[in-house]
Amino acid sequence: MNYEAVIALEVHVELATRSKIFCGCPTTFGAEPNTQVCPICLGHPGVLPVLNRRAVELAVRAALALNCEVHPESVFARKNYFYPDLPKGYQITQYDRPLATGGHLDLEVGGEVRRVRIRRVHLEEDTGKSFHGGDAHGSSPEHSLVDYNRAGVPLIEIVSEPDCRSPAEAGAYVEELRSVLEYAGVSDVRMEEGSLRCEPNVSLRPVGSERLGVPVELKNLNSIRAVERALVYEIERQSALLAAGGEVRRETRRWDEGSGTTRLMRVKETADDYRYFPEPDLLPLGLDAAWIESIRRSLPELRAARRERLVRDYGLPPYDAAVLTASRSLADYFEETVRLTGDPKTVSNWLMGDVMRLLNETGVGASVLRGRDSTFPPASLAELVALVQEGTISGKMAKEVLEEAFRTGRSPRDLVREKGLSQISDTAELEAVVDRVIEASPAAVDEFRAGKEKALGFLVGQVMKETEGKANPKLVNELLRKKL
């Protein structure tokens, strides 16, 4: 029997607030374990939560950016379960009356536009973080440790409808969602730091059937690549199980990056297991319609609109526009550099090529390009482009200059002057070199005169070799053709 995959995604996003959702503890990533805690986020008896207004504002921004209906009243609930990373023994979340519902996200996969519906967006608090089996902070195979710094960090959970049909679609959904949230200024969406965590639910059903299969939830996915790999494996696992006459259980499985497999964590709970009931320490959350509308008006241009504008206003190919707008920081960097150079396609080529390579090699995100401490601001790339366009350096030299300027923060023009990298563009000086190369290469000269264009490339290479790569290649070409 042929099966098709049905994938829904639950995405937890840490909101970009300075303090936690119900107390004043900071949310700084990477602090020493258990140093950003207080009686409220540790769940001490007798303490009361106070809702963080900024967290609500960011949650509303996210919901509006995802085309959701934000409800004028929503209700917090207690989700009850017992696990060491949950100090109160329950999590404050939203259940039957969430902040927002009914949105959608459009994404392009394989040249087609797919719409994934958003079921709900709700507010909740994060849990602590457990360390098992000697993975960090001194834990051992016999002992687990818990860091409560993350407990109480404000989250939104974004739940999609089961509209994705392949791992590639699921990966495209997470990528597009991450871009929308970054553009909206809701979160830094750094999956490697856990500020965006994706938990797909995947099931199989016979092709043509409308009935959903038994879903399996996947955890421990810290990259889009991991999301896609885990789904590929899980679809194959469930297919083999069904083909052998077995049944898929409703369970939660952990992705193991090392082995490339999913492993059973626990049999999946149902909503009844959590014994949801309204949170007695928090009033229903009432939102003024005018306040919601003011947040809607404050939303910036989002990725889809910016992508279209880069094609329309700058004449970029759709592929370039899609790459450059994947990150708001990268798109901002592009537009600022174009403002300084007036050359969109050249700037696009540099960013999509060597600059992206350096970002990947150094392991930093595109956001580093726009920060106050950026070592390679738009003015530096604009300066590099100008040096090539005015003939001061060749494209090959420019790549070397970029490398050092990016890593050190030095001005490209200063580096060129200091290292004596300026191109030789003096016609008389180059003519003498060209004459010597022609005289020393009679075979190549005869081949070129016989119509073999490749021979010119050899002669240009000889001139570049003699000038240690400093000759202006365009001028060398012109002089060779003229003399031959």
Image (cartoon, rainbow, N blue to C red):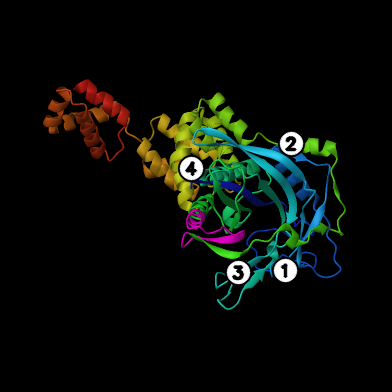
In this picture, which residue range is highlighted in magenta? 237-260
Whether 378 is drawn above or below 145: the answer is above
Which of discs 2 and 3 lies nearer the camera? The answer is 3
Can residue 369 be seen by looking at this rendering? no
First-in-chain label (2 vs 3): 3
First-in-chain label (2 vs 4): 2
Amino acid at circle 2: Ser
| Local crowd size for mark 1, using a 10 Å CA cut-off: few (<14), some (14–19), many (≥20) | few
Residue that label 2 marks? 298
Considering the image in quadrants, where does the C terminus appear? top left
Amino acid at circle 4: Ser
The x and y percentages for residue 134 are: 55, 73
Secondary-structure class at tag 3? strand
Mark number, residue 131: 3
Residue that label 1 marks? 82
Mark number, residue 382: none
First-in-chain label (4 vs 3): 3
Task: Give the Cα separation between the discs numbered 2 and 4.
Answer: 36 Å
